[in-house]
Image (spheres, rainbow, N blue to C red):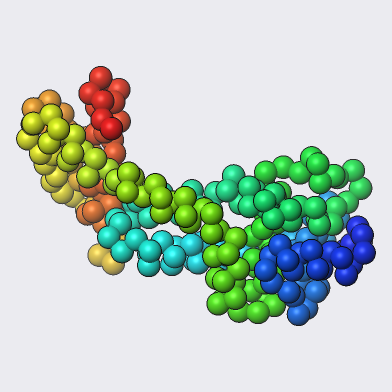
Amino acid sequence: MAPHWHTDSMMNEQALAHALQYRFTHTDFLKLALTHRSMGPPHNQRLEFLGDSILGCIIATYLYQTYPDAPEGLLSQFRAHLVNRTTLARLTHRLKLHHHMILGTGESIHTLTEATCADLLEALIGAIFLDSNIETCQQCIYAWYADEFSALLTHTPVIKDHKSQLQEWTQAHQVSRPIYNIDHTVGPEHHPTFHVHCTLQHLNQTLSGQGPSKRAAEQQAAHKMLNWLKHHGHHHD
C-alpha cells in the first residue's frame, strides 16, 4: 500500500518544515520516514536504522567538543540520556511529529508507543541525511536538542565522574584516598580489556572494574565502590 497523507499534502509539508526547521527537496524521503510499519513495506524502519547511527555520531561529537575534560564514562552517560527512547519520544511529541505519521488500519496517533515515536524521529534524521548531508543533519539536531543541551550544561557542574565522587568522599571523611591497581588485561593488544581493583584501606574493602581503557576500568570500580558505600550506610553526595 503506497504511503499517503492524512490531510492536505501542502499543509503537512509546511507544518513539518516548520517543526523540523528543514524543507525536503525530495518529499519521497519524508513520506517514507513518516510511514509506520502497519502500512506494510516500504515503511520507515530502514531509515530508522540509518538515523540511529547518524544521531549517535552527531551527539557523540557534540559531547566530545563541549566537554573536553570529561572522561569517557561520563560522556557515555550523557549520550545514553540524550539518545534514549524516552528523550527521543519527548522530542517527537514536542515537535508534534507524530501527528503526521502515515498509519495503517487500526492504528491511531493517540495510541502510539514510546518506541514508535522514538523510531519516527530517527527515521526523519535518516531521511534528512539522504536528502541533504551530515552538516544539515547536525544543524537540525542541534536545533531540536537546544533545550536538552542547555539542561545538560546547567547540571554538569554538579555531575562528577565516579572517581571524583569517591575521592571527595574520602576527603570529606578524612580517610586515605582510594588506591587503584591494574590486576590484568585480556584480549588482543589493539583491543585490550583492563581489569582494575579499587581499594579503600580504612574499610578493608576492594572491588573490581573492567573496561577498554585503564581509566574506564577505574571509573567502573569507583562506581561499584560508591554503590557499596551507599548500601552499607556510608552515604555520599
Position of residue 60 relative to residue 135, above or below, is: above
Which residue is at 17% across, 40% downward? 167
Residue 202 vertical position relative to residue 119 in the rendered view, above or below: above
Image spot of residue 112 (x, y percent)? 76, 44
- Image quadrant holding the N terminus, namely bottom right
**Residue 67 sits in quarter:** bottom left
Q: Position of residue 118 (x, y in %)?
A: 65, 51
Residue in the image at 29% along x and 46% along y:
160
Query: Is 175 in front, or is 224?
Result: 175
Q: Residue 187: image x %, image y %?
A: 29, 57
Quadrant showing the C terminus = top left
Q: Residue at x 74, y 53 (%)?
A: 96
Left or right, 205 with reference to 45: left
Residue 53 is at least partly visible in this image: no
Q: Position of residue 37 (x, y in %)?
A: 79, 54
Residue 109 lies, with reference to residue 204, above or below; the image says: below
Residue toward you, 182 or 99: 99
Q: Is residue 54 above or below residue 172?
A: below
Q: Residue at x 23, y 53 (%)?
A: 215
The number of numbered discs placed on residues in the rendered structure image is 0
Which of the pair 196/70 is nearer the observer? 70
Q: Nearer the viewer, residue 187 or 127?
A: 127
Q: Is residue 128 visible?
A: yes
